[in-house]
Image (spheres, rainbow, N blue to C red):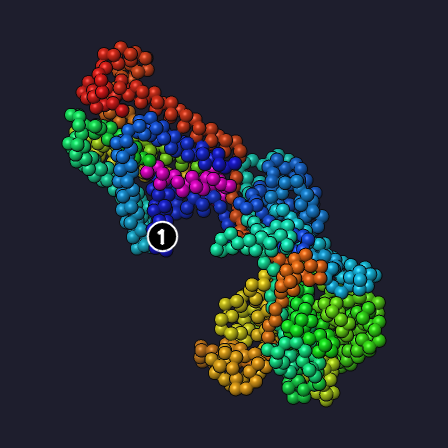
Amino acid sequence: MTASVFFGCTFIAFGPAIALFLFTIAREPLRVIFLIAGAFFWLVSLLLSSLVWFISVQISNKESAVQQKGLLIFGVVLSVLLQETFRFAYYKLLKKANEGLLALSQEETMPISIRQLAYVSGLGFGFMSGAFSVVNILADSVGPGTVGIHGDSQHYFLSSAFMTMAIILLHMFWGVVFFDACEKQRWWAVAAVIISHLVVSCLTFQNPEYVTSLVPTYVILFLMGIWAFYTAGGSFRNLKLCLTCKDKDFLLANHRPR
Amino acid sequence: TRIFQSVNCVKLLYAFLSFAGVSCNSVEKKIYVHLNYTVSCVRLLNATHQIGCQSSLSGNVGVLHVLESEENLDWVLHSGPNPPYMVILESPLFTRSVMMKLKNGSGRVAGVAVVAPNTNPAEGFSPHTTCPNENTGVYSETYEPTMANCNMTVWNPLGNGLSYEEFDFPIFSLKDDNDTQVIRQCYLDHNRAGNGSTPQYPLCAMQLYSHMSAVTDTATCMRRNAINFSLNPEMVCDPLGDQNVWASTRPLNNTAKGHKMWESVVIAAARLDSRSFFFDIAPGAQSGVSGFVTLLAAAHALRNATQEAQPNRTILYTFFQGETFDYIGSSRMVYDMENKQFVVDLDNVHSVLEIGQVGLRADSKLWLHTDPVSRRNESVNKEVEDLIGNLRSAATGLNVTVDVPGFSQPLPPSSFQRFLRARPIPGVVLEDHQSAYTNKFYESMYDNAENLNVSYPPNLTPEEQLEYITDTAVTEVATMVARALYRQAGGEESQLSSIKADPQIVTKMLYSFLVRSNNSWFQQLVPSDFTSYLANRPPNFYVGVVQQSSEPTLLVQYLLANLTGSTINITQDNCKNQREDESDKMYNYMWVQGAAPPNSTEREGYCVRSTARLSKALSPAFDLEQYTSKNFSTWTESRWKFIKGRIFLVASHELEMLTLGVGVGVLLSSLLVTYIISSKADILFSSGREPTNATY
């Protein structure tokens, strides 16, 4: 019966990511390649941070609760910084790769724009980090038990799934904003991405009060979403056009063969 | 392991990073509490039946219910709203009527856990049958119809037969300790319905794993054992069995089997094994230990007398294994004697004296049980009378009185019956009961030190308890048995008064077999590679499967060697290779640890030369491949992968469905939204600045 919890949580955590993958990425091989490469870069950052973690746990005093808590905060901050470093490294790599692609390409324009790359690599980061944060939990959600014998909230699985969904989407938005900021050399925007990432990660220290971690995370998600929307070229006007279905004339007016 | 650690580290890290608040525990630890002490009832099979318990392959899960009274069963069986239930029983409720109601509980029972009390129940408890080994003793329809099936005497009237029932759910035993307290607390916190209302989710539940591989009966499982699909054949069951222990007062050439000319042996027998409902607990204090400790003490008392003035006949001490399960050990020895596979044959057997349950004597009385059927033969009767006479005169001057039950009463369940099945050998079975057992806990987990009244003053260290002389009753019986055996073997009268069992040795043995086998005395008497088997608890006397010798078998062999043998001065290598200068095949050599001398930590080992040997105790049915045999034991034990249990909370069905519903909702709506967005990406993301590249 607890298979329903497993599928429920999987759908919550990965539903949006799967939908995005299906409709926007799966059809174009180049995007799939960059998605996987992004996921790989995130994995490398994880490898480095777990190495540091492994060493620091070994040399720390395991009895001291204060030290262990400090170690945990250190681990989180370090990991976030490493992830953003690797996002930057990936950006640099993509710039180089794009030049190469352009040289190879028969067409004059680039086969994939830097904005598309930002979105695809952000989603790759999100996929991998989402998988790593929730797979352990999903494995145990199959049951037969649920969390709570030591007095924890029984909404643990549900809130974990929602948190993962937020993190996947956030990585996507961060990717878009970060790449754009790098492109335009707006370093304050890069800083904003890093800080919001730190804030979201540190919010999880509020667990097991899930409301106090989930609500601010979703507020940040919403704000980042709007920012990413505008960065990606969206605007309120476009949205209105889209929603009021006045897009046909617009489409005709802007139509050009691709 | 280093790689494994780092993988774990990565996992942990991510548990931390994304959901850092969950402290250092993994998710599994937040959900489950594993039970430390899991003793289960397992499945055994014979020619026609399977008995015992099993869970499903993935373990049985049920909502906990602590049963308070028999009336409370209605909640489990009918009215409770959250079946199936995992029933926690206090031991007074572990009765046949409750268990049979649960057995017929129509799928509303997921399993049972019995909380073993710290003191024995006053009213007695025996999960065995009323007529132990009913069909494999001597009293069959052909031998004497009036005595078959315990027609004359019901030996174990308290027996409720639970051990021989088949349950399709797991049954575990819990100690009354922290684990049990956690379970009770979990029940009280979550499952206790306040005045008539139904309890609210989440509920506390338990999962018990004890899946058994074998099914139906021995013939089926042995056939499945023989099927080899792969290089490593998957076994499903193993025959019960072990090794018998034997020693003789005169060395016998063990390489020459079969009849020995001019040899006449008096067999002094006792049984080694016991059982209870749960396979891992079989203290067998009265049913096994009292008898074989008496025989060991008697053998020790006879050491000097038989070496100084060798009697005409040889005394053969035998300790039979697996007697609980249709006389595995004795039937094998008789079979071997008949087929010239044992060191002597049945023609060499002069008489049999068996020591049964002798620990609980009312008015210091012992009863000499004999077989009325074979005594109809005049010559046999005379031999039996002689043996009784020897026992009677051995008892004079001791605090033991012997008496014979009514002439027409058949033998109680005993190994001697297997000898009688072969031929009318004269013999006596020594018991502390006239008819029904005085043992109120026959083959149960309560047949322990407390049942034998072995107790120690408080505040004694284990070493002081070892030396503390608890009881002299068994010593008296041992002295009597030793003297009677000596007379029966034709020894000289003058030696009799010097034959005395040592109370120190007896109490040390009782302590070691009933309280803890890991003590300084046993450590001296065993080889160094055996010390890891010594434990701070009494040994488990369940016979186990034939592949490995159980701890009690080897302990008894080492004890018998030390108590009847002698120390000889040869090197460790020669000792281990069974070599002395001459007389190679007559003796068995054993290098034991010995004691450490004062101001030294190094033990000084020595070589013990004795006649103590092991012989096979596997039912002949398995050698003959007669898995439906009516003459021999056909018991097998099923194999299992693991036996374990854990408790946790289960969420309500509504919450689970809500989670699934939300998940499906999120998935469908994101599919829809993404489709719309991607189909209108042209419009949405078209700022004037970068029209061509903004398409997604």
Chain ID at mark 1: B
Amino acid on which the number 1 mark rests in the picture: Gln
**Callout 1: SS:** helix
Bounds of the magenta segment: A128-154
**What residue is rendered at 60% in x and 42% in y?**
B85
Determine which quarter of the picture holds residue A215: top left
**What residue is rendered at 57% in x and 42% in y?**
B62
Q: Where is residue B359? Give x, y as percent.
A: 70, 69
Question: Would you place residue B601 above or below residue A48 in this image?
Answer: below
Question: Would you place residue B311 above or below residue B291 in this image?
Answer: below
Question: Would you place residue A144 above or below residue A27 in this image?
Answer: below
Q: Where is residue B544? Give x, y as percent.
A: 59, 61
Determine which quarter of the picture holds residue A238: top left
Classify residue B595 as left or right of residue B75. Answer: left
Which quarter of the image is occupied by the C terminus of chain B?
A: top left
- Front-most of residues B596 and A111: A111
| Residue B121 makes an appearance in the image | no
Which quarter of the image is occupied by the N terminus of chain B?
A: bottom left
Based on the picture, tell me whether residue B403 belongs to the magenta stretch.
Answer: no
Q: Which residue is mark 1?
A: B5
Q: Where is residue A90? Give x, y as percent.
A: 22, 37
**What residue is rendered at 26% in x and 27% in y?**
A228
Based on the picture, tell me whether residue A137 belongs to the magenta stretch.
Answer: yes
- Front-most of residues B44 and A133: B44
